[in-house]
Image (cartoon, rainbow, N blue to C red):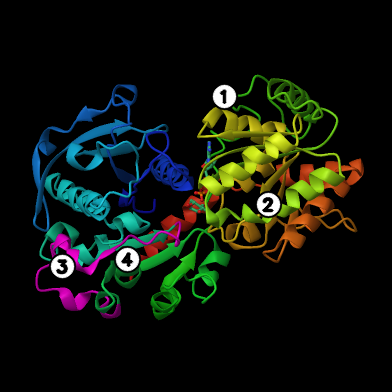
């Protein structure tokens, strides 16, 4: 029997407790996989005000009540609640109202960096008080990226952490946790200025993610293609030099899909279920959905879907021209769900007014609707500018909803362009980040839809893909074991 590992996961969002995007799905699913494989995995996350403690039977941890927490010169008090995630992995919720009783998970408050420095410190303090020695400390994104440096400094004399290896996973390099150098004392690392990135300091800032890249034993991102991309000037967002300096320590592991949550064979939000042998059910769901959404044309014509944070990353501006043009020229209906930057929300609202009965836009966040869109749509659009992994294209594949994606990051690693000559491929993939390329992709998809022989083939090819965590989670365990053995 291979040795079971002690793994401490730190994540700023965890499905179903808190979610703004894919990090929540991934942190929950990785914890579930590791727990299921018998490892001692403990997932730490902030106890945001929005979390319904009763719903998750969160229980106070006796040894971790009213614990003093110093974040540099700032003093707080935290307590810890233990909850069970679906699948059984324990979640340790850091309850600190001064930091997490806000209206949103992320804020632009001036103490945003303190909220997550506090979280990181509280999690390490909690491990100490529990006398728990994690073999691996796996942090995620900028929020917990100072953990590796903390282990080498503030906690360097703690025997529990003497053998702890660190992993930083970058889910989104577009968010780096930059705060003013004038707040250096908030790090609580007096006399350690030389360990910080000097050029950033000189420029008046501290970049959390950069210090994770520098000090973690291993840096991963969520697809092999994106691991190469972020070392380039085009995609590195200013961190490419720090990444290149880590050489082979930077790798990519594609995210998995939690098929307990995302599978049309048993999706809890759907009234009927299907697989590749029961595609008529998908057609029926589309009819029901079109009716409820008042998409008059939809039952007969193809329906394209979109579920997304509306951020610059997602390539929405490519749709500004391409969508009206294609909608004007060909039979197509479109449903979008998303929230974020006002210019994108306005665009979709305008599109809805311009194409009544053919376009519907839902602003906001809606889990049930996200599942319905995956099931009822024929096409799913992800024209991302960059996409570290992306989950919805993988969900789409399982739902028989053909993804139309740009060849970048995890989209490039999970969708293959359909080749009508030999019937291979799972979607429509375009290369260049411009309107014409997206227009080409939409037209290509609509041409395929009009050729049922090809359409059925591409749909079924996609439904056969397997991105389960059984495979991807094993890659993390292999990485942990390599680090421990090194
Ligand atoms: P990202 O993490 O960059 O937002 P991913 O594709 O990895 O992109 O993950 C997005 C996740 O968030 C998916 O589970 C998707 O269904 C969900 N999601 C995004 N926006 C919404 C929304 N408005 N309503 C419901 N779910 C959403
Ligand atoms: C990010 C990325 C997305 C990825 C998700 C989970 O927010 O934008 O591509 O799938 O994290 O790793």
When asked about the image quadrant of residue 153, the answer is bottom left
Residue 465 appears left or right of 108: right
Q: Is residue 61 above or below residue 181?
A: above
Number of other residues with Cα within 10 Å of mark 2, as a class: few under 14, some 14 to 19, many 20 or more? some
Q: Which residue is mark 2?
A: 320
Marked residue nearer the N-terminal end (1 or 2): 1
Give the CA separation, mark 4 to mark 3.
Answer: 14 Å
Task: Please report the residue visible at 25 percent of the width from the left and 33 percent of the height from the top.
Answer: 82
Marked residue nearer the N-terminal end (4 or 1): 4
Query: Magenta stretch?
Result: 171-199
Q: Is residue 229 above or below residue 112?
A: below
The circle drawn on residue 268 is 1
User: Where residue 31 sits in the image (x, y, percent)?
Assistant: 39, 44
Mark 4 vs 2: CB contact within 8 A:
no
Give the CA separation, mark 1 to mark 3.
Answer: 47 Å
User: Where residue 482 sits in the image (x, y, percent)?
Assistant: 39, 66
- Closest to the observer, 198 or 255: 198
- Closest to the observer, 272 or 131: 272
User: Where residue 164 sits in the image (x, y, percent)?
Assistant: 25, 61
When asked about the image quadrant of residue 197, the answer is bottom left
Query: Can the viewer see residue 391 in this picture?
Result: no
Give the CA separation, mark 1 to mark 2.
Answer: 34 Å
Number of other residues with Cα within 10 Å of mark 3, as a class: few under 14, some 14 to 19, many 20 or more? some
Tell which tag, 1 or 2, sits nearer the viewer.
2
Give the CA separation, mark 4 to mark 2.
Answer: 37 Å
Q: Which residue is mark 4?
A: 212
| Magenta stretch: includes residue 195 | yes
Q: Is mark 1 within 8 Å of ligand 1?
A: no
């Amino acid at each position: 029997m291979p040795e079971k590992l002690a793994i401490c996961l730190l994540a700023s969002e965890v499905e179903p407790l808190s979610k703004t995007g894919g990090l929540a799905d991934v942190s929950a699913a990785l914890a579930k996989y590791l727990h299921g494989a018998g490892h001692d995995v403990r997932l730490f996350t902030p106890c945001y005000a929005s979390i319904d403690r009763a719903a998750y039977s969160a229980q106070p941890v006796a040894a971790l009540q009213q614990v003093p927490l110093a974040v540099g010169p700032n003093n707080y008090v935290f307590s810890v609640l233990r909850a069970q995630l679906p699948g059984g992995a324990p979640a340790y919720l850091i309850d600190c109202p001064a930091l997490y009783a806000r209206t949103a998970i992320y804020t632009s408050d001036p103490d945003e960096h303190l909220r997550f420095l506090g979280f990181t410190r509280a999690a390490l303090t909690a491990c100490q008080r529990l006398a728990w020695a994690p073999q691996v400390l796996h942090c995620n994104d900028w929020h917990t990226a100072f953990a590796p440096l903390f282990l080498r400094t503030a906690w360097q004399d703690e025997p529990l952490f003497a053998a702890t290896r660190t992993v930083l996973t970058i889910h989104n390099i577009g968010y780096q946790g930059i705060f003013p150098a004038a707040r250096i004392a908030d790090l609580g690392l007096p006399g350690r200025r030389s360990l910080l990135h000097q050029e950033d300091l000189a420029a008046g800032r501290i970049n959390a993610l950069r210090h994770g890249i520098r000090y973690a034993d291993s840096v991963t991102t969520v697809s092999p293609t994106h691991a190469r991309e972020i070392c380039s000037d085009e995609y590195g967002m200013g961190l490419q030099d720090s990444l290149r300096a880590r050489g082979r320590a930077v790798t990519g592991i594609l995210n998995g899909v939690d098929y307990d949550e995302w599978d049309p064979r048993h999706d809890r939000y759907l009234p009927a279920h299907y697989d590749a042998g029961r595609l008529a059910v998908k057609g029926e769901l589309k009819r029901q959905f079109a009716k409820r959404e008042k998409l008059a044309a939809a039952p007969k014509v193809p329906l394209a879907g979109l579920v997304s944070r509306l951020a610059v990353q997602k390539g929405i501006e490519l749709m500004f021209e391409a969508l009206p043009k294609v909608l004007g020229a060909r039979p197509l209906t479109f449903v979008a769900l998303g929230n974020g930057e006002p210019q994108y929300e306005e665009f979709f609202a305008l599109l809805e007014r311009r194409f009544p009965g053919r376009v519907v836009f839902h602003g906001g966040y809606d889990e049930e609707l996200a599942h319905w869109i995956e099931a009822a749509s024929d096409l799913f659009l992800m024209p991302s500018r960059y996409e570290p992994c992306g989950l919805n294209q993988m969900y789409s594949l399982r739902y028989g909803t053909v993804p139309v994606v740009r060849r970048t990051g995890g989209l490039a690693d999970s969708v293959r362009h359909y080749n009508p000559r030999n019937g291979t491929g799972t979607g429509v993939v375009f290369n260049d980040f411009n309107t014409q390329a997206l227009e080409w992709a939409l037209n290509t998809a609509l041409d395929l839809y009009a050729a049922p022989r090809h359409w059925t083939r591409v749909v079924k090819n996609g439904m056969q893909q397997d991105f389960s965590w059984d495979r991807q989670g094993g890659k993390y365990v292999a990485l942990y074991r390599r680090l421990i053995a090194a």
